[in-house]
Structures are given as structure tokens and as C-alpha cells.
Image (cartoon, grey):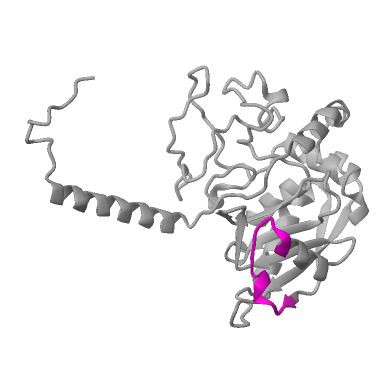
Amino acid sequence: MKMNSRNDNTNFMAPSNKILAYFLTNLLFCAGSLLYAQLPDGTRSTVGWIEEIKKNRAEEEKRVFNEASAEHSVSFSVVPYVIRDVNGIANCREEDIKESIDGLNFYFKTINVLFRLQPVHYVNDYNYSSVSRNDTMEELIKMHSTERTINLYLVESAKDDTVPCYGFTWFPDDSIRNTIFLDKDFIRGNYLVTLMGHFFGLLSTHDTLGGFENVSENNCAESGDFLCDTWADPNLFLMVDTLCAYAGTLIDRYGQVYVPSVANFMSESHDRCKCIFTPQQYRRMLFCVQRYRYYLR
């Protein structure tokens, strides 16, 4: 590629113009971030859960899933805990919590799973209003939780270590933590659906802890999210606009361009675009309901 000479005045930018361009670039970046109003999913995949998926693969795949196969309905109680802020304000409407649970029931009815919303509890201690994976989080769970239920903590902010996220949870092999943390700003939309997908065993479609999935999907059963009806995903965070157009041009290790699904709940697509679980995702969740989470019913 031909390089421009510094003596070419048409391409040289004066220092004052450089400063102006710098601030304009940052202004556009901040405006874009506000437009997206996106934070990443803070749920971490674990080696332990990936080993469970591998161990269960043969048994899981014997269960040919369709809606008729989910004959016996299972219900789970969800107990919301709203942590008030430093001014004692909840900043979370109960009608929004109900709407979010209604969304769960709409998408999980395919496997005959029902979520029963329990009365909302309010925690009057702002010290728990911002959480990460630390001792404060464990204190909150110990002091405010209900046995044999899914405990939903609605907080002012959540972090995966030091990285802000919209929420996080744990996979089914961690039966001690029947908990989901969600930033109150994200109670509306599909964020809780995604976190509940993790709670019932789904990895993110862009997960790479178990290996990178090729665009050809010839290694789909032993890499990525370990499912073969979800498309290979390079991680869609801030790469899908509000019109659900994927703007990326990323390629895999073989030079193949990714053509990911912007509609899958377990992707980092824009929230308004997400509306589907695949049959194999439903099959895995149903398997995990019956194998790992049945004790909560």
C-alpha cells in the first residue's frame, strides 16, 4: 500500500485540527455508546461446566427435542430483591419486574417451564446496591435469600470484577448459588431471558473457553457453545445496530467471514433484535431443568 508523504499538504493535519478531530472522535464514540445503552453479559463460562456439557452430550442428544416432548410442566418461584440506593429510593417499578417475568414465561413455555413471581422484597442498605463477585455479594446472598427459589437481585450497578455489565448468574453445576444479579436499568427487555438461559445451562454463542468455533461449523460439537444449530459468533457486542444490522467483517482462523445470528438470546446482539432460542438450546435447557435444577421446583 502506498504511504502518504508528510510533505503532502492535502493529507497533513495541523496540530490544532488534530486536537479538534480527537475531541470530535471521542464525542461521536460517547454518543454512540449512549445510543446503544449496552453493557455486556457478565456471566462467565467455566471449565467445570464445559466438562459437564461434554460428559452429558450423549445422553442429552438422545432426547430428540420438540415441543411435544416437554410434556410435564415445571414451575419455579422467582423472589425479587430490590436494593434501594443511597437515598432510599428503589428505582425499580414492580410492574417492570412483572413484565420481565411475563417475557420469561413467553419464551420458556416451549419447554413447559413456568416462572411464578413472588412478592418483591426491598433491601434498605445501599452498601449492597453495587455488586461484583466479592464478599459483599456473598453477604447479601447470606442475609437476603429464600431457599428453593431463584433469587433475583436488582441492583444499581453490576460488575464482572472491574468491568461493568448488565448482570450475571451461575451455571447449573453450581447448585449453591440459585441467584441472578441484574442492573435495574435492564429489567425491561430480554436481559433476564439471556441470564436465565445461562442459569439453565446455555453458554454464550460466542464463547471460546472450550475452543473457537469455525465459520464452517465443522467443529460445532466440541467448541464454542457446543451446539450445532447456533451459528458461529465472533462476539456481537456493539457490532449490531438498533435496526439489527450486523456491521462486522471479522473472519475465523481459516479466513472465512462470520455470518452470525443477530436474533439469538445468547449472543451479545442489540437487545431489541434478540428473540429466539434454537431447538438444541431448548433441548439443553430442558435437560438441565430435569438433571440439575429440579430441586428448585
Is residue 60 visible in the rendered image? The answer is yes
User: Where in the figure is residue 219, as x and y percent of width and height?
Assistant: 67, 20
Instruction: Specify the farthest residue to the front.
Output: 135
**Which residue is drawn at the image coordinates 82% and 45% (left, top)?**
172
In the image, 157 versus 256, the foreground residue is 157
Whether residue 1 is situated above or below residue 166 in the rendered picture: above
Task: Please state the horizontal and vertical placement of residue 81, each as a whole percent of the image.
Answer: 74, 70
Return the residue nearer the eye: 94 or 48. 48
Residue 144 in sight: no
**How many discs mark residues in the rendered view?**
0
Q: Is residue 199 magenta?
A: no
> Which residue is depicted at the point 47% across and 46% down?
238
**Residue range of the region highlighted in magenta in the rendering:** 122-136
Q: Residue at horizontal 56%, vertical 50%?
A: 40
Which quadrant is home to the C terminus?
Answer: bottom right
Q: Please tell me in which quadrant of the rendered image residue 125 appears.
A: bottom right
Image position of 46 (left or right of 208): right
Q: Determine the residue positioned at 90% across, 60% down.
A: 148
In the rendered image of this protein, does residue 113 appear above or below residue 128?
Answer: above
Q: Quarter of the image for the N terminus: give it.
A: top left
Q: Nearer the viewer, residue 90 or 242?
A: 90
For residue 36, above or below residue 155: above
Is residue 162 toward the left or the right of residue 49 in the image?
left
Examine the structure image and report whether residue 127 is included in the region drawn in magenta.
yes
Q: Is residue 205 left or right of residue 68?
A: left
User: Residue 274: horizontal and vertical position, in percent?
Assistant: 59, 47
x, y percentage for residue 199? 76, 49
